[in-house]
Image (cartoon, helix red, strand yellow):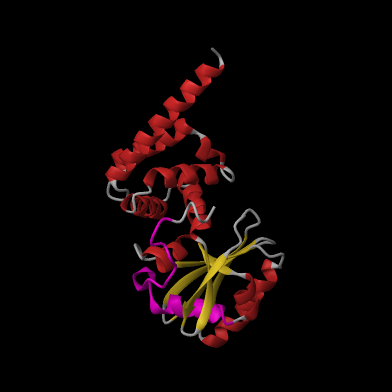
């Protein structure tokens, strides 16, 4: 999956424009100094997409994922004990469950929300490393990131999701791989999210995006997606008619 969902020029490296504040970056480094996190967790989500791949927007959170069978409450407790000794006060714990924990740490008045997520649906287990201040940071691969982001775009459609997807698809266009990339994106995302297999819904969403969110999503990209979906619908209709003739 990674090979097909990784357009040319996509190599993880730090993008300084993606950090909201130096304290956020330093917090990530402190977390990955802890053996449990350096061995079992990796940076993912929109923050990873921004600070390690595109640098297209500032992200306030740290989304840390694991596919290992470890106790998330135990991992969270480790952060709650160790980070205050490094100057990061635990302002609030938002949620703790067997597969998820979330809370806010503060240093120098800068608040950073940290999420720990146990994601057993991730299929591609390859991770790359980006070294920050001598500390290896494991980061999610591009294929997992874009399918997760597309699923988030379809289900919640927050402004940050719209901005991220626009940047992803714009890069695919700029590298001359738009159609094969989009085909693969729909195929892979549909394995975890049935919404990605609903052509009618997709057309409705991107029509709305083109009309109402041109400030967040490049209009040309929206039109290219709609043209692709129209072609896809005609292709499926012709195939269906051929089977029943």
Q: Residue at x 49, y 45 (%)?
A: 184
**Residue 144 inside the magenta-drawn segment:** no
Q: Which residues are magenta?
A: 7-33
Q: Residue at x 49, y 42 (%)?
A: 186
Residue 190: name its quadrant.
Answer: top right
* Res. 89 in view: no
Does 36 sit above or below residue 156? below
Q: Residue at x 44, y 68 (%)?
A: 12
Does 155 sit above or below residue 2? above
**Residue 19 inside the magenta-drawn segment:** yes
Q: How many marks?
A: 0
Q: Residue at x 39, y 79 (%)?
A: 22
As drawn, the residue found furthest toward the top would be 245
Q: Quadrant of the C terminus?
A: top right
* Res. 49 in view: yes
- Left or right: residue 128 versus residue 11 is right
- Left or right: residue 147 versus residue 165 is right
- Left or right: residue 226 versus residue 67 is left
Q: Position of residue 63 (x, y in %)?
A: 52, 65
Q: Position of residue 119 (x, y in %)?
A: 63, 58
Q: Position of residue 122 (x, y in %)?
A: 61, 56
Q: Position of residue 73 (x, y in %)?
A: 68, 69
User: Which of the two residues, 208 or 43, is positioned nearer the viewer here?
Assistant: 43
């Amino acid at each position: 999956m990674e090979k097909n969902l990784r357009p040319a020029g996509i190599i993880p490296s730090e993008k300084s424009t993606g950090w909201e504040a130096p304290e956020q970056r330093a917090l990530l480094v402190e977390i990955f100094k802890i053996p449990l996190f350096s061995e079992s967790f990796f940076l993912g989500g929109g923050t990873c997409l921004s600070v390690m791949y595109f640098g297209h927007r500032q992200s306030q959170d740290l989304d840390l994922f694991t596919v290992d069978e470890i106790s998330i409450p135990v991992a969270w407790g480790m952060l709650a004990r160790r980070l205050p000794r490094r100057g990061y006060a635990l302002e609030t714990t938002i949620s703790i469950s067997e597969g998820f924990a979330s809370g806010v740490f503060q240093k120098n008045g800068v608040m950073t929300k940290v999420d720990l997520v146990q994601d057993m649906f991730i299929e591609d287990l390859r991770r790359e490393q980006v070294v920050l201040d001598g500390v290896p940071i494991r980061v999610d691969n591009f294929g997992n990131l874009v399918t997760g982001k597309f699923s988030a775009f379809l289900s919640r459609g927050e402004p940050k999701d719209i901005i991220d997807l626009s940047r992803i698809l714009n890069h695919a266009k700029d590298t001359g791989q738009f159609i094969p990339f989009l085909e693969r994106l729909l195929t892979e995302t549909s394995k975890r999210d049935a919404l990605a297999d609903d052509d009618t819904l997709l057309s409705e969403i991107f029509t709305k995006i083109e009309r109402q969110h041109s400030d967040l999503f490049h209009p040309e990209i929206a039109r290219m997606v709609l043209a692709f979906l129209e072609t896809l619908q005609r292709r499926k209709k012709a195939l269906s008619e051929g089977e029943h003739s």
